[in-house]
Image (cartoon, coloured by chain):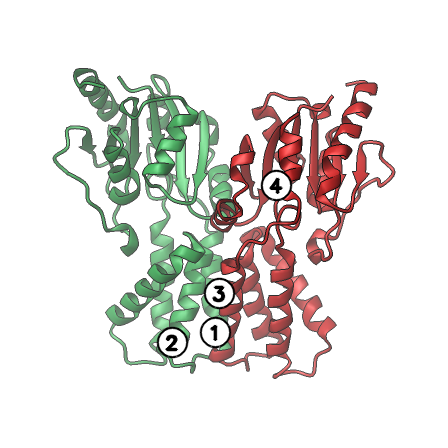
Chain colours: A green, B red
Amino acid sequence: MIELVGFDADDTLWHSQNHFDAAQAEFEAILGRYLDLSDRQAHDRLAAVERANVRLFGYGAKGMTLSMIETAIELSEGRITGQDIGRIVDLGKAVLEHKVEVMPGAREAVGAVAARHGVVLITKGDLFHQERKVAESGLAGLFHRIEIVSEKDMPTYRRVLAEFNLPPERFAMVGNSLRSDIEPVLAIGGSAVHIPYASTWVLEAEHKVDLESKRLLTVDALAAVPEAIALLAERAIGEPA
Amino acid sequence: MIELVGFDADDTLWHSQNHFDAAQAEFEAILGRYLDLSDRQAHDRLAAVERANVRLFGYGAKGMTLSMIETAIELSEGRITGQDIGRIVDLGKAVLEHKVEVMPGAREAVGAVAARHGVVLITKGDLFHQERKVAESGLAGLFHRIEIVSEKDMPTYRRVLAEFNLPPERFAMVGNSLRSDIEPVLAIGGSAVHIPYASTWVLEAEHKVDLESKRLLTVDALAAVPEAIALLAERAIGEPA
């Protein structure tokens, strides 16, 4: 029995990582004017700077932009020009400004799940940017609640479920990130539907999901989500709560 | 009759603007190495850049840092070095890292109000940074709810009150910002206690508050808040709802 279904937003209901990837490719092209770097070196150093800064910046495009600037100054040993740093600031602005492209079948999938269960949008990152994307997506009205959180970990999911007064056994999460959408939900006793996305941010790629879990299903498109939820709901009835 | 009291956080329950002011003073000192600028020119240009960027960045230290970098590149006509831009990034990090200094009497004032009314913390800005400050302040447990919002305007206050199922006439807000804490609350029919802070961010300084309103009291310290709320509650009984 599943009463509430959570949907991730970025790279689940709409595209996001492709914009970050495009910014990073441009960033590497700018750095290439200063250094004979393999792409991998710039990429790895940026990932390390982001990893160190995430405890201070949290997630989102503004933090990425500041980490890019820090990485560019460091790798160019201070030789990067003000004009090129201005270009990096503009890359960050482009990520914040891009139009929201809703995934095919998103509205139908959420609507079909909402006909049988409560539905909540659970997204992490920059509050201001996420609110804009939720509004622009046109999907906000489908959800019973929208939760913009700073981290998607076990305490966060427990807090959201406590607000709904619901045990984890009656909750399923739908998303693309094994680290943020699947691992913590399975760990607290919930169910999950994984929809892989073409590209995953390096800091999102680390996870400890048991891919053989009976409480996890993997599908390749949003259209398959309602049926996956129905199957997980049947399984949840069969399990002790 | 007042059932719910909202408390602002930055510059009401703990110091914040002094850290932003210190970063800006350092920023102007860095720029002074490139330009013969009066402080006012750097200050005014940064304010204009921040005003243009706030629709994209929202509030908080990361957006301020990116706006400082943009302003520095523009005013120095690209001559600013990578090393000095690295110093500006560090100024932003220092704002994000500073220890929370709770105002004298904050715990007692919130506690006294909480003994008679519901109390909610309503703060705007960067989700990640605000969560850290709330946790570090040690005050979180005093509040019935904590709302971190992207903007403090009439729709935001209406949404918060709708979640409490409360008409605005039964709500009072306590804060330092006439623009964010007082003006929208009076405009929807609520009451407010203003506690001026020594320094106000230029974008916060614009407001249209009727300082003669009977639903507004101004006090000079948190210790005076419980009595001010009691007085506003008496006045609210006398008014039609």
**Crowd class of label 1 (few under 14; some 14 to 19; many from 20; radius 10 Å):** some
Of A202 and A109, which appears nearest the observer? A202
Q: Which residue is mark 3?
A: A89
Of A166 and B227, which appears nearest the observer? B227
Q: Between marks 2 and 3, how big is the CA–CA gap? A: 16 Å
Q: Secondary structure at mark 3?
A: helix
Q: Are marks 4 and 3 on the same chain?
A: no
Q: Is residue A8 visible?
A: no
Q: Which of the two discs, 2 and 3, sits closer to the camera? A: 2
**Crowd class of label 2 (few under 14; some 14 to 19; many from 20; radius 10 Å):** some
Residue A52 percent location from the top left of the image: 36, 62
Q: Are marks 2 and 4 in contact (CB under 8 Å)?
A: no
Q: Secondary structure at mark 2?
A: helix
Subunit of mark 2?
A
Residue B48 percent location from the top left of the image: 67, 62
The number of numbered badges drawn on the structure is 4
Q: Are marks 2 and 3 in contact (CB under 8 Å)?
A: no
Q: Which residue is mark 2?
A: A74
Q: Between marks 2 and 4, how big is the CA–CA gap? A: 44 Å
**Crowd class of label 3 (few under 14; some 14 to 19; many from 20; radius 10 Å):** many
Q: Between marks 4 and 3, how big is the CA–CA gap? A: 41 Å
Of B168 and B176, which appears nearest the observer? B176
Q: Which residue is mark 1?
A: B86
Q: Are marks 1 and 2 in contact (CB under 8 Å)?
A: yes
Residue A22, by quadrant, is: bottom left
Q: Between marks 1 and 2, how big is the CA–CA gap? A: 9 Å
- Residue B107, numbered circle: 4
Q: Between marks 1 and 4, how big is the CA–CA gap? A: 38 Å
Subunit of mark 1?
B
Q: Between marks 3 and 1, how big is the CA–CA gap? A: 14 Å
Q: Is residue B225 left or right of residue A208?
A: right
